[in-house]
């Protein structure tokens, strides 16, 4: 690096000065790269461990960090042949898709009304939504379960969709409200002058601009619903209704724990989420930035 700096100093002209300043800037921010690498290691280490465990035999008692030698693919064959993993993915997919549909449709329409009507009542509603977000879903599990049992909503798709949508809507409404508040009201007024109704303004003017924040909602809420365990454990009691997390639980018992098969199931269960995120990450990052413009 010192040789590079010396070579740049011997160059003449504005381009050499710019290059020298750029190199100094990079040297000054070296700690940022070290911090980024450390965070990358922290986030990737659990993935390494679970993939490592999935490639070990049941009799392998070596450290979880120690790479398997030889690599054992029997855990994946066992999980695939059992077939429970595909049923779990199907159940997760159905519940996740319908929860997202409910949250997106209701969330963006409610957010439009809250963002465009600055009244004391709407301010009260926004504060109420924020306060609901502070409640941990686990603390009201007993009450929710008893209520859903009375209406025969346990072990059903619609019961899980209803419960998970109710818990996710406050965050979704907040994200959409912040984003819609950043859209100029002049667009609504221009459409109204042209004779558009409130519904037409929403569907033709506001809704097309909500793509990035909608992707943010899909990823944030979709991951939460896909990985849901507590409510799925109590509500989905039938074997055919098991989700991915409940399929993983079947490999743990009082007699023995099959860590390899459980890890293989988790790896397969993560693949759909990883694929969706890789396809939508550009919109996800932009949506987070846009949603934070106004609070």
Image (cartoon, rainbow, N blue to C red):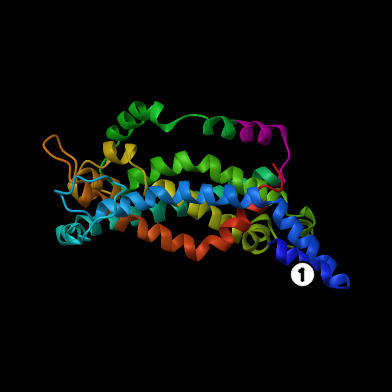
Residue 128 in view here? yes
Q: Is residue 265 magenta?
A: no
From the image, give the main secondary structure of the stretch colored magenta.
helix
Point out residue 43 in the picture as x, y percentages from the top left corner: 46, 48
Identified at 71% across, 32% down, the residue is 120
Residue 112 in view here? no
Q: Which residues are magenta?
A: 116-127
- Occupied quadrant, residue 270: bottom left
Identified at 17% across, 53% down, the residue is 57
Question: What is the quadrant of the N terminus in the image?
Answer: bottom right
Which is more toward the observer, 17 or 193?
17
Residue furthest out toward the left = 255
Question: What is the quadrant of the C terminus in the image?
Answer: top right
| Residue 177 drawn above or below residue 26 | above
Q: Which residue is mark 1?
A: 7
- Occupied quadrant, residue 273: bottom left
Identified at 39% across, 40% down, the residue is 163
Give the number of callouts.
1
Which is more toward the observer, 293 or 248?
248
Q: Is residue 231 left or right of residue 262?
A: right
Instruction: Assess disc 1: are there few (<14), some (14-19) or many (≥20) residues with their C-alpha within 10 Å of its C-alpha.
Output: few
Point out residue 182 in the picture as x, y percentages from the top left corner: 73, 51
Q: Is residue 12 left or right of residue 242?
A: right
């Amino acid at each position: 690096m010192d040789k590079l700096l010396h070579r740049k100093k011997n160059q003449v002209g504005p381009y050499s000065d710019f290059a020298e300043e750029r190199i100094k800037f990079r040297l000054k921010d070296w700690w940022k790269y070290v911090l980024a690498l450390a965070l990358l290691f922290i986030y990737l280490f659990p993935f390494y461990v679970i993939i490592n465990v999935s490639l070990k035999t049941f009799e392998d008692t070596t450290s979880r960090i120690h790479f398997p030698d030889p690599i054992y693919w029997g855990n994946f064959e066992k999980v695939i042949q059992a077939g429970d993993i595909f049923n779990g993915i199907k159940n997760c997919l159905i519940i996740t898709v319908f929860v997202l549909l409910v949250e997106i449709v209701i969330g963006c329409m409610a957010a439009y009304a809250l963002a465009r009507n600055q009244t004391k009542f709407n301010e009260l509603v926004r504060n109420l939504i924020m306060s609901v977000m502070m409640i941990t879903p686990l603390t009201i599990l007993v009450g929710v379960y008893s209520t859903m049992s009375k209406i025969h909503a346990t072990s059903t798709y619609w019961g899980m969709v209803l419960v998970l949508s109710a818990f996710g809507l406050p965050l979704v409404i907040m994200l959409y409200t912040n984003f819609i508040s950043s859209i100029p009201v002049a667009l609504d007024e221009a459409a109204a002058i042209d004779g558009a109704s409130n519904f037409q303004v929403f569907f033709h003017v506001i809704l097309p601009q909500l793509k990035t924040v909608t992707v943010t909602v899909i990823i944030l809420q979709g991951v939460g619903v896909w990985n849901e365990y507590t409510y799925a454990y109590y509500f989905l009691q039938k074997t055919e209704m098991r989700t991915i997390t409940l399929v993983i639980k079947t490999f743990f018992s009082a007699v023995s724990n099959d860590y390899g098969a459980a890890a293989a199931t988790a790896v397969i269960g993560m693949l759909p989420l990883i694929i969706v995120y890789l396809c939508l990450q550009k919109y996800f990052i932009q949506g987070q930035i846009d949603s934070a413009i106004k609070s």
